[in-house]
Amino acid sequence: MQRSKKVVILGHFGVGKTSLIRRFVTNQFSDQYKVTIGVHISKKVVTLSAEESISMILWDLEGTDSLDQVRDAYLLGTHGVIFVFDVTRPSTFQQLNSDLKIVSKKLPERPLLVVGNKKDLVSEKDLNELLLSHNISHDFLTSAKTGDTVEDVFLNLATLLNTDA
Amino acid sequence: MVTKMDEQAKLETLKELLFPDDRGAVEDISKRIQLLELIINDQKKLADRVDPLVDDKINAFTKSMPDTLGPTITATLKKEIKNHKDEVVDALYPVLGKMVKKYVAQEIKILSEKIDNQLSFIKTWKRKMRSWFGGPTEEQLLMRELASATIEQVLLIERDTGILKASYSVTNSIDEEMISGMLTAIKGFVEDAFKKKNQNLELIQYELYNIHLQSFVTHYVAVVISGNYHLKSKNKLQDIIFNFYYNFMAMNLDLVFNSKEGKEKKVRTIEKELLEQELAASFRDAKI
C-alpha cells in the first residue's frame, strides 16, 4: 500500500535544503547556489517493505531569517518536517531552540527531524566541539555534497510518517 | 360402634355439603388453564389475541415519538454535524453553489447579451482589421472564436496538503502528484498574498490552456482546458464539477456516518480507483 505524505523542509538561507532534496531525489549535487523563490515541489517514493511505501511530496520552502516569516499557506496539512541548519554558519543554528519552538507551535505533534548539513566542510573534532559549545541537539549530520547520511534522514522520516499514519 | 368405613363416608358427605362451590371453581380454573395452554401453544391463536395489543402499543409509541425520542435524535444529529462540520458544509456546498451560480449566471447572461448587441459591430471590424494587418484570416479568427473548449485533465486535490486524491487525463503529463503540489503552492501563495479572506484563486491561464480551480472546503478540483474557454464553458464546467463533488462528498458522508468511531473528525478514505472511475464517468464525454 502506498500513502502520500507532505513533508516541508525548513531552515535559514543557504543551508542546503534544495541540495539535500536534489541529492535524495536525483542523486545529484551542484556547487552553484540558486536561491529558491517561494516553493519548489519534488517527489520520491520510499519503499519501506514489500507491502508499504510512502510517496514523499517534498516542499522545499525558500529560506528565511526567521521561521515566523514562513507563509502559513505552505505549512497547511504538513505531515512531517525537516529543519536544516548549516554546521559552518553559527547564525543558522544559534537560535535553534527558538526556531524549533516556532516549528512546534505552527506544526504541533508532527514528526520533526533536525539536520546539520555541510559536515564535509568541517573536521569531525571541530564539529563536535562546535555543537557542544552551542548546546545543539540534532538528529542527523549530513553532506549533500558527498551524499553522506542524506538517505538516512528521509528514510527515517518516512518510517516515522508510516508509524504516524 | 361406628366403623371406620362409616366415618369416612360421613366425612365425604359432610365435605359435599360444605364445599360444593369450591369444587366447581377448581374445575373452572382447570378448564381455563387448559384453554390458556392451548392458546399459548397455538401461535396463530396467540397472535390473534396479542397482535391487536402490540399494534395499539406501536401506534401509541409512534404518535409519542416526536415528544419522547425527538430531543435525543436532534441532539445526536447536532452532535454529529458539529463533529463533522467540514464534511457537512462540503456536501452542501455544491447544492448551494449551484443555486447561487444559476441565479448569477442568468443575470450575467442577460447583461452579456445586451453588451454583445452593443459590441457586435465593433467586434466584426476589429476582426477584419486584425486580418488586414497581417494576422490570421478572418475565417481562421472566426473558427478560433467558435472552437469549443476541451477538458484535457482533471485533478481532485486535498486542499491543505496538496495531495492528489484522484485524476483523469486524456493525455499523459508530468507527474500529477507534483502538479497537484505546485498548484496548491501557487493557490496558497496567491490567496495568502492578497490577504482577502474567503477568496479563492479560480483560473490560471497559459497560452492556449486554462486551468480552472474550483475550491470546496476540504478539497479542490483543478481542470485543465484547451480551446476557447469562456463564460458559457465555465458555467457548464462548474455544473459538472458540482455534480461530481456532490457524489464524492455523499460517499464521504456515508463513510463518516457509518463510522462507529464517534468523534473522529477525518475525511474518510475512498478507494482511489473508485474515485478515478467517478472522475472519468463525470468528465470523459463532457461537452463544455
Image: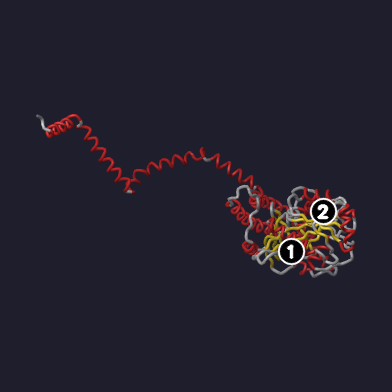
Identify the residue position indicated by label 1 in the image: B228
Q: Residue furthest front?
A: B1
Left or right of A26 on screen, residue B249 = left
Looking at the image, is A92 positioned above or below residue B5? below
Task: Count numbered badges in the picture.
Answer: 2
Question: What subunit carries mark 1?
Answer: B
Distance of mark 1 from mark 2, alpha carbons?
Answer: 57 Å
In the image shown, does B198 or B274 lie closer to the viewer? B274
**Where, by quadrant of the figure, is residue B13 drawn?**
top left
Q: Amino acid at mark 2?
A: Ser
Instruction: State which chain disc 2 sits on.
Output: A
Tell me the amino acid under the disc marked 1. Answer: Asn
Q: Position of residue B201 (x, y in %)?
A: 76, 54
Crowd around label 2: few <14 · some 14–19 · many ≥20 (10 Å): few
SS type, badge 1: loop
Marker disc for residue B136:
none
Residue B288 seen in this snapshot: no
Q: Is residue B94 above or below residue A21?
A: above
Same chain for mark 1 and mark 2? The answer is: no
Q: Secondary structure at mark 2?
A: loop
- Where residue B121 appears, as percent x and y from the top left, is 78, 60
- Image coords of residue A94 (percent x, y): 88, 51
Residue A137 is tagged as 2
Q: Could you tell me which quadrant the N terminus of chain B lies in? A: top left
Give the residue at x 70% y 56%: B158
In the depicted structure, whether residue B227 falls above or below residue B193: below
**Where is residue A68 drawn, in percent x and y?**
83, 49
- Is residue A159 visible in the rendered image? The answer is yes
Q: Quadrant of residue A59?
A: bottom right
